[in-house]
Image (cartoon, rainbow, N blue to C red):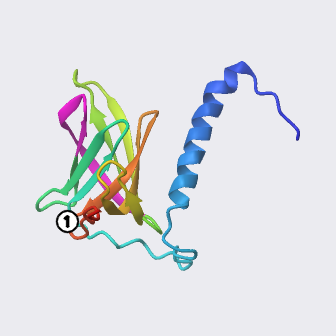
Amino acid sequence: MRSIFIPPSMHAMARRMTGSLAALALIAGCAQEEGSIDSEGAVFDGIAPEAQIELLGTEPFWSIAIEPDPGADSYTARLSTSADIAGTAFAAQRFAGNNGLGFSGQIPRTDGTGGRAVQIAITPGECSDQMSGRVYPYTASVRLGDELLLGCGYTSDEPFTPPRSP
């Protein structure tokens, strides 16, 4: 096997790229079945624009609730963590891809200057929460600045499946 030299100045960039590529590979691997991406380029319509969306993950604990704004073509998302249970609301823009749904926005800083970029990808595919035993209809990946959070999701139209009884 051949190895290549990466200068120390490039290590941080290589780590970021590796993390991003791993996240993309994980998302791509979540398709329900081979060939589920429409070769004609049809846009994903599995989640209705008026549906409420809940995303969650563990280690670290986090959740994002996404709701349509009444009478507008916009959305409000709220990120909650174990350090901020009440959560922080931010405006989110919805876009549909070929095999999933995305949202992007910016979480405002407490001092009102700038914010942290948020990118959310929701993909159809069974997802299990190992702590509760629930099964969810969607996988989720959330990029918060340089941080990547992975988890599961459900909607007001497609709830999670309760854990099986022993």
What SS does tag 1 mark?
loop
Q: Is residue 144 above or below residue 104?
A: above
Q: Is residue 75 above or below residue 164?
A: above
Q: Quadrant of residue 138?
A: bottom left
Furthest-left residue in view? Answer: 70
Quarter of the image with the C terminus in it: bottom left
Q: Which residues are magenta?
A: 78-96
Quarter of the image with the N terminus in it: top right
Furthest-right residue in view? Answer: 2
The kind of residue tagged 1 is: Ser
Counting from the top left corner in percent of width and height, residue 133 is at: 32, 56
User: Relative to residue 95, is residue 2 drawn left or right?
Assistant: right
Q: Is residue 115 above or below residue 157?
A: above
* Residue 89 colored in magenta in the image: yes
Q: Quadrant of residue 126?
A: bottom left
Of residues 157 and 45, the one nearer the viewer is 157
| Magenta span main SS | strand
Counting from the top left corner in percent of width and height, residue 76 is at: 20, 49
Q: Residue at x 55, y 61 (%)?
A: 29
Counting from the top left corner in percent of width and height, residue 83 is at: 24, 28
Q: Residue at x 51, y 75 (%)?
A: 36
Q: Residue at x 35, y 32 (%)?
A: 116
Q: Residue at x 50, y 67 (%)?
A: 31
Count of labels in the image: 1
> Residue beneath label 1, please?
156
Of residues 146 and 104, the one nearer the viewer is 146
